[in-house]
């Protein structure tokens, strides 16, 4: 198959996306597909006159991925580097190449990739793509909507609320919350802009800094506990994985820098608790109207209570990512996982 692996973009998870995309591209090429890596924003400005020749490029454009740094990318610098200086999200030749491909494998993370807008655009343009539909991405990306859906469907989640800038000075007591709390952006991923606050001063600072990222902030009761994740493919939950950071919590640096975190899969927890997480993963998948695949994140407190934090609709696919490790525990190696995602995406929408 001719496959465009779409990556990069303009979110804070740009570096993660490029690395995910590169590993997906290599795996698909290793299984005989004509896969090419393409940055959705920077595009391919110096493409051959006959665009079909792009699928035969020997290097597959893999040189655009140069690893994940310890800090977020400079998005303004990325915008300035674009040759045509356009503010269009789709770079040169992106739409044309995606239309030529049999399918676009979405290796994007964060805004414009996981918030449903790109999927909706592709639906209108007749471009086939991997992962959940636009509606599921919209519902899962907005954590205030996700929290309401979780509460309506009895999916265990931390007590919390959402806050807009005009209400940022209201005391926590007005929301029925007390310290310690977690403050995080309403949308986004890779734990960018997430703060654990134990004092009023920490809380005020976290709110101010979170509003730099977005206009809506989630405030949740802090749950002290172990961290887990559970992937799902075609409605069936994978084995649960435990995440054990060597220090702090599973933040951006711990997620993507080698040696910062230990993962255990299947997780060393009682079978009943693992089944609860898997059942909640499947329940959340259905409630958020998802299809193809996703990954739910959990906390387990000292009393054995589980809490679903969020659902990632395009989870990471790097060597350090959780979903590939869960799939491996279920007997699905990385190349087979990539092909399975392609096949289930075709089944969900195009067959």
Image (tube, grey):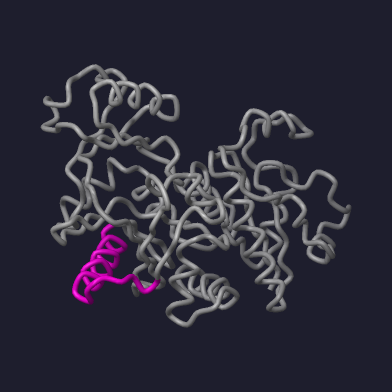
Q: Where is residue 262 shown, x and y percent of the image?
A: 44, 61
4 on left or right of 333: right
201 on left or right of 304: right
Above-or-below relation of 326 to 12:
below
Q: Where is residue 198 shown, x and y percent of the image?
A: 24, 31
Q: Where is residue 298 shown, x and y percent of the image?
A: 29, 57
Question: Which sits in the foreground, 292 or 156?
Answer: 156
For the magenta stretch, what is the residue range?
Answer: 265-287
154 on left or right of 28: left
Above-or-below relation of 105 to 108:
below
Task: Tell me what residue is drawn at x 11 percent, y 32 percent.
Answer: 176
272 drawn magenta: yes
Query: Furthest residue to the bottom?
Result: 331
Q: Quadrant of residue 207?
A: top left
Could you tell me if residue 351 is visible in this image? no
Q: Where is residue 344 shown, x and y percent of the image?
A: 48, 73
Could you tell me if residue 49 is visible in this image? yes
Principal secondary structure, stretch drawn in magenta: helix
Query: Furthest residue to the front?
Result: 246
Query: Furthest residue to the right?
Result: 49
Q: Quadrant of the N terminus?
A: bottom right
Q: Quadrant of residue 33?
A: bottom right
Question: Which sits in the foreground, 107 or 247?
Answer: 247
Question: Which sits in the foreground, 31 or 15?
Answer: 15
297 drawn magenta: no
Q: Quadrant of residue 168?
A: top left
Task: Tell me what residue is drawn at x 43 percent, y 56 percent.
Answer: 313
Above-or-below relation of 233 to 112:
below
Task: Tell me what residue is drawn at x 23 percent, y 73 percent.
Answer: 275
């Amino acid at each position: 198959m001719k496959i465009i692996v779409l990556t990069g973009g303009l979110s804070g998870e740009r570096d993660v996306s490029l690395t995910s995309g590169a590993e997906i591209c290599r795996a698909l090429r290793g299984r005989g597909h004509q896969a090419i890596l393409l940055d959705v924003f920077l595009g391919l400005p110096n493409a051959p006159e006959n665009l079909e020749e792009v699928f035969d490029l020997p290097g597959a454009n893999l040189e655009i991925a140069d690893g994940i740094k310890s800090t977020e990318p400079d998005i303004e610098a990325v915008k300035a580097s674009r040759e045509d200086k356009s503010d269009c999200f789709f770079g040169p030749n992106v739409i044309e190449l995606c239309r030529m491909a049999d399918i676009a494998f979405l290796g994007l993370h964060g805004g414009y990739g996981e918030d449903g807008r790109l999927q909706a655009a592709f639906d209108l343009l007749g471009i086939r793509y991997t992962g959940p539909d636009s509606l599921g991405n919209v519902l899962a990306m907005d954590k205030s909507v996700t929290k309401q859906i979780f509460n309506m469907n009895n999916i265990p989640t931390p007590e919390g609320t959402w806050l807009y800038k005009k209400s940022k000075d209201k005391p926590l007591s007005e929301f029925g919350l007390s310290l310690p709390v977690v403050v995080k952006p309403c949308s986004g991923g890779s734990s960018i802009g997430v703060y654990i606050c134990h004092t009023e001063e920490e809380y005020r600072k976290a709110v101010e800094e979170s509003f730099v990222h977005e206009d809506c902030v989630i405030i949740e009761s802090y749950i002290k506990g172990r961290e887990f994740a559970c992937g799902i493919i075609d409605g069936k939950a994978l084995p649960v994985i435990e995440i054990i950071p060597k220090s702090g919590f599973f933040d951006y640096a711990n997620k993507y820098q080698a040696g910062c975190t230990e993962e255990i899969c299947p997780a060393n927890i009682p079978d009943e608790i693992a089944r609860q997480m898997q059942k909640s993963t499947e329940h959340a998948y259905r409630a958020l109207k998802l299809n193809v695949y996703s990954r739910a994140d959990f906390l387990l407190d000292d009393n054995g209570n589980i809490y679903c934090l969020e659902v990632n609709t395009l989870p990471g696919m790097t060597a350090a990512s959780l979903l590939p490790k869960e799939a491996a525990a279920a007997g699905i190696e990385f190349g087979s996982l990539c092909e399975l995602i392609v096949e289930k995406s075709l089944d969900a929408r195009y067959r």
